[in-house]
Image (tube, rainbow, N blue to C red):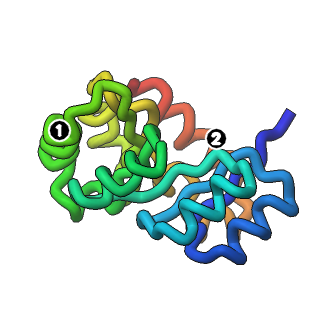
């Protein structure tokens, strides 16, 4: 069984597209109120992107508890995420860091109880997908899994 998810949702049209595809979840790079409202209306499991406390609070006001911390590394990395989590004053918040995550830094995120997963392209970068090098992608996935 495949759970289809859609990434980089930036508009209401993207939410409609995801809904028409019966997408199980969507990720966004930011926390746009119009997209938050549309996702609620369409009943799509939506994971808004946040990089500061204002965005975390906005997402919480709309009822979102699972947030994409993006771009993780260039926004301040694990230290910034720890600070956001602490200042949010909500034990129900969870994060999926994305942006600059790789096999070398992923465990610093995954070791935190408020991090549910990490996202990144290091396992399957565009050039490896384009060359259809499935063995390399499998190898990279195994290395990442073994390092957890």
Can residue 38 be seen? Answer: yes
Task: Give the CA separation, mark 1 to mark 2.
Answer: 31 Å
Residue at image point 16% right, 56% down: 76
The answer to whether residue 60 is left or right of residue 33 is left
Q: Is residue 99 above or below residue 145?
A: below
The answer to whether residue 3 is left or right of residue 106 is right
Earlier in the chain: of badge 1 and badge 2, it is 1
Residue 41 drawn at (x, y percent): 70, 57
Residue 111 drawn at (x, y percent): 28, 24
Residue at image point 74% right, 45% down: 24
Q: Nearer the viewer, residue 80 or 140?
A: 80
Residue 61 drawn at (x, y percent): 39, 49
Q: Nearer the viewer, residue 127 or 8?
A: 8
Q: Quadrant of residue 86?
A: top left
Q: Which quadrant of the figure contains the N terminus? A: top right
Q: Secondary structure at mark 2?
A: helix
Q: Looking at the rendered structure, which numbered label has been put on residue 138?
A: 2
Q: Quadrant of residue 130?
A: bottom right
Q: Which quadrant of the figure contains the C terminus? A: top left
Residue 95 drawn at (x, y percent): 38, 40
Q: Which residue is mark 1?
A: 82
Q: Looking at the rendered structure, which numbered label has been put on residue 91?
A: none
Residue at image point 30% right, 51% down: 57
Q: Residues within 10 Å of mark 2 (few under 14, many from 20)?
A: few
Q: Secondary structure at mark 1?
A: helix
């Amino acid at each position: 069984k495949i759970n289809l998810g859609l990434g980089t949702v930036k508009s209401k049209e993207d939410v409609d597209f995801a809904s028409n595809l019966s997408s199980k979840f969507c990720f966004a790079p930011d926390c746009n109120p119009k997209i938050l409202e549309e996702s609620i209306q369409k009943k799509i499991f939506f994971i808004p992107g946040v990089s500061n406390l204002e965005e975390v609070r906005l997402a919480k006001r709309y009822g979102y508890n699972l947030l994409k911390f993006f771009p993780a590394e260039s926004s301040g990395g694990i230290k910034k995420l720890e600070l956001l989590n602490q200042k949010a004053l909500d034990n129900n918040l969870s994060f999926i860091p994305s942006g600059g995550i790789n096999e070398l830094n992923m465990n610093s995120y995954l070791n935190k109880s408020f991090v549910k997963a990490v996202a990144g392209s290091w396992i399957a970068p565009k050039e490896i997908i384009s060359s259809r090098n499935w063995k390399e992608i499998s190898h990279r996935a195994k290395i990442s899994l073994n390092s957890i």
